[in-house]
Structure formats: structure tokens, C-alpha cells
Image (cartoon, grey):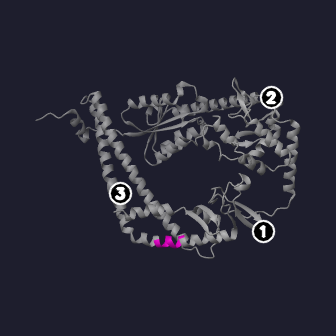
Amino acid sequence: MARKSRKQQAAAAPAKELTGMKIWKAALYIRLSVEDKGDHGVSLETQQRIMENFAALHPEIQIVEIYTDNGVTGRTFERPAFQQMLRDADNGIIDCILVKDLSRLGRNTIDAGYYIEKYFPLHGIRFISVNDQFDSISPDNDGNHVILPLKNMINEAYAFDISRKVKAQQRQSMKSGEFVGARPPYGYEKAADNCHQLIVDEEAAPVVRQIFSWASEGVPTNTIARRLNESGILSPGYYGVSKGRIPNNRLAGNGKWQTWTVTKILTSEVYTGDMVQGKSKTVGHRQVCTNPEEWITVRGTHEALVSRELFQKVQAILEEKASKSAASSKVPYTENVLRGKIFCGHCGKNLHRQRSHEKYIFHCISNDRIAKDYCSGSPRLWETELFGSILTIIQKEAAVVMDKKALMQKADSKLAERMSGIDRQLYELRQRISRNQGFLKSLYQNFVTGVLTGSEFRSMKLDYEEAIQADMSIVRALEDEQKNLQSQMEQLSDLADRLEHIGRDTELTASLVNQLIERITVYDNDHIEIVFCFRNAFEQLEGVITDE
């Protein structure tokens, strides 16, 4: 009889020789906080290498995903990659989590203990901390219910200590008159030899002086913003990008001077040569304003751009305008149900809602706030007329939706056939994955008993792992398609039910707008375009139904 190759022997190993070894779908979780930067021992690469080396010695551990939170504190578990990892665990993509040590999981004692002792076991997740020699399924860790909380407390104390020292150092620097901040105020730059020293930015400083000069003459802040835009002067954000102080345009705003930007400059004492810092602090991972008595003020720390007399004159003008505005009796505005949804069709900016004699009007204010002739159309529509036009368009769309609903009901059999086909594909793929996982288990048994050499074991293990991974990717894609089809059908059916009740007496509310409308573009009274939230969903679903 011909002798079988070792690969054939391994693949054909009888079921009775299988050890029943479970193949764990493992995730490597890597975290690096700001305090850890520069420490090579906890670098992203080091953490990954330590865990990969551990997995290489445990054939039952198959690495399927790597999750990384870079620059995120361990005192909170609301981290993007960590939360995604939990969602993937819930969906069965992973069932084992590896970390380099407990501090990488987190430095919050209560939450870390909850995940290790409650959440992971409840969800069938094996948890391994490599450097702590902790494995949740190992009987050798029976006493770790005592040791782990202690280590977590040490980690949490370390995080609090680091945070406290950083904050203390920052406050001391503020008290010494040093600038503490990522970016210097507009009109200044950091000294080349001392990042805590502000020096005059000769290019931007004249703009700051001009802003104060106009304000001292009583020029309104919106007029100042328009003048700056008309002069082609870069906004502080875009100026920061041009100087390399801001990494990209996404962090620089829309590129135009705004009223609030001008006001921020006019109310900042830094331009008098004084350093006023500590106006905000972190409370519960959120920035909150502090009381003025908590501010840290140091006089004469850098060259002034305006005199204190000019600064005080401008403050008096701003306060007088604010007092007049507060003193005038105001009738509360009604709700703007189109907030964030309605735009000018000529310049693309938001349409402004303004009250006029107890009535409301939507109009483009780009020519007043940004620059003269910035908008070529400047549409103006009374709210009642605008709402009537929008409801008319919604009613027409509702009729179209009802027609499409009838069409979908007639095509139910085709959609059911598509779903059934996906079910068959999933069954075949899962069967193949199960067979390959069985072969993979048998490899380790044959390696231990000497049927396979180490190199043969690694080569065949890689082949089976790649086949399993490929099939699992297809399974996930098909499952997603299945969920999307089902979700779209339910969503559109529900939507059709709502639209069915829309009539002439329907009131345009914020709830209705948010459910139906993505964007409204106004060119004039007779030209209004609406992008509906469900339009693309209908097109995708029809594509499935009509696909031959």
C-alpha cells in the first residue's frame, strides 16, 4: 500500500485522535497614552511583538484582529478601538483578548475589575495578560481574584499620580508667566528657543491692531469680520495651517472670519502683554469654564500689541452694546425646525432665520457677514411660504414612496429568494470552516506525537488558517448583506407607514424634518431642492429586486 504523505496523514487524522482543543479567535489589544510616549518598553510595536510571541507558543490561539488606541488615557474605557473590540466580541468575531499587561487594559480599578471578573466571563471571552502571567481559563490563576484588584489599584494610582504631576507642573508654569498651550494666540508665535515664551508675529500683529482700532471706533463685530474677508486676510485657523501650526484644514474651520472669532480676539487680555491662563479645566473628561477668581494672571510677560487703555475702551464699548441688547424686551423665538438642514443654493452657506414683526424669514447673510457680493443670489423667503413649498414636495415624494411600496410587496418572492440563496451560501461556508478547524486541531496532535515536523506543522497551520480567514471574511460580508437587506425593508416599510398619513393639514415639525430630510437647498421661491434620507435606500433595494 502506498505510504501517505505527512500532510495527508494530518488532514485525515481520525476523530478519535482529536483532543477536542478549542481554537480561540484572539484579539491583540494595544494602548498607548500620552504619558507613555517615549517609553520604549510600552511602545505599540513592543506590545504587539510580546503578544505575538506568546501566541506563537500556543497553537490554540489564532490572532484574527488587532485593536489599537493610540494616545488615549487608561482611566476611561470609552476608547474607540476598545469599544469596537467589545462589539466584535458580541458578534462572535473574537472570543479571546490579549494585552501586554493589566495597565494596557486600563488604569481604573472598578471598571478594569468589572471587565476581568464579570464582563469577559459572562460573554465567554478568554482574557490573557501576558506579563502578569494571567490567563482566565488557567486553573493556576485561582488566587488572582485577590492579586488582580491590587494591581489595578496600583495602575489607577499611577495614572492619577502622573495626571496630578502634569497638572501641577502646568499650573506652576502658568504662575511663572510661561505660556502653556499647543498653539499661540493669533498675532503671536512661540520663541524658537523657548516654547513657553510668546513673541510678536510681525505678519499677523497688524491685523490684530486693526481689529482693535475698528472696534474702538464703534464698528460692529460682524462688519469687522466682513471687512477682513473682503480684504482677503486669512482667518486665524487657515493662517495657522499656512504656518504649519495646525496640521490640516479640517481643524481650521471654514476659512472665513466669523463674528465670534473677532469677539474672542477683542476680549483676550493677552494682547495687552499680560498672560491670563487657567480659564478652563477638565472635569470628568470634559472641559468646563472656571470662575474668574481661579484664573492665573501674570502681568507684562510679553510684548503688547495694544495698550491697556485701548483694550479697556473696547471692553466698555462691547459691554454697553451687550447691556442695551439685554435691556430690550424680547419675545422668545419659536423653534427653528430647519436648523442645520437648509442652505443657500448660490453660495452653499446656511440660511439665517430672522424675526421681523412677529413673522420669520429665511435669508442668506453671506454678503453681510462674509464679503460684499460673496453670494450672487441672496434668497429671501418667508417661513410660512417656505414651509408650504416643503410640505408640497414631501407630499409628492410620499405618493412616490407609496407606489414603490406596492412594487416591493409584489417583488417579495424575489427578495425572499435572494435571502434564501445567502442562507445556502452561509451554510456551505460554515461547514467548510468547521472542517478546516477540525483539521487545524488535528495538526497540533500530530505535531505533538511526531507525525509532523515543526516546519511542516507551521506551514500546514498557515494554510488552514488562511483558508479559514478567507471563508470567515466571506461569511461576515454575507451576514452584513443579509442584515442590511432586512434593515432596509423594515426601515422603508416603517417610513412608508409614516408617509401614508401626510396630508395637507400636516404640520412641519423638527421630528418630521429629521426623519425625512437630509438637506434643503434654496435658490429662490420657485426653486427648492430637497434631499431625502431614504432616497438612496430605495435605490439600493430596487437594485437587489431588479438584479437578474
* Label 1 to label 3: alpha-carbon separation: 59 Å
Tell me, for residue 136, which label it has, or none: none
Nearer-the-camera pick, 298 or 228: 228
Give x and y (percent) for residue 215. 83, 45
Side of 122 relative to 202 (left or right): left
Please give the residue where the numbered disc 1 appears in the rendered image. Answer: 358
Is 195 in front, or is 217?
217
What residue did someone put label 2 on? Answer: 301
In this rendered view, identify the residue nearer to me: 410 or 78: 410
Magenta stretch: includes residue 259: no
Residue 19 appearing in the image: no
Do callouts 1 and 3 mark residues in contact (Cβ within 8 Å)? Answer: no
Q: Quarter of the image holding residue 5? A: top left
Secondary element at tag 1: loop
Q: Is residue 108 above or below residue 343?
A: above
Q: Closer to the N terminus: mark 3 or mark 2?
A: 2
Q: Tell me the distance, in whole angstroms, between the alpha carbons under discs 3 and 2.
A: 70 Å
Q: Could you tell me which residue is drawn at 65 percent across and 47 percent down?
A: 254
Res. 239 image quadrant = top right
Main SS, magenta residues: helix
Instruction: For mark 2, give the secondary structure.
Output: loop
Q: Where is residue 346? Give x, y as percent.
A: 63, 58
Q: Is residue 539 left or right of residue 261?
A: left
Furthest residue to the bottom? Answer: 504
Q: What segment carries the magenta color?
A: 397-403
Say if 443 sits above or below 533 in the image. above
Mark 3 vs mark 2, foreground winner is: 2
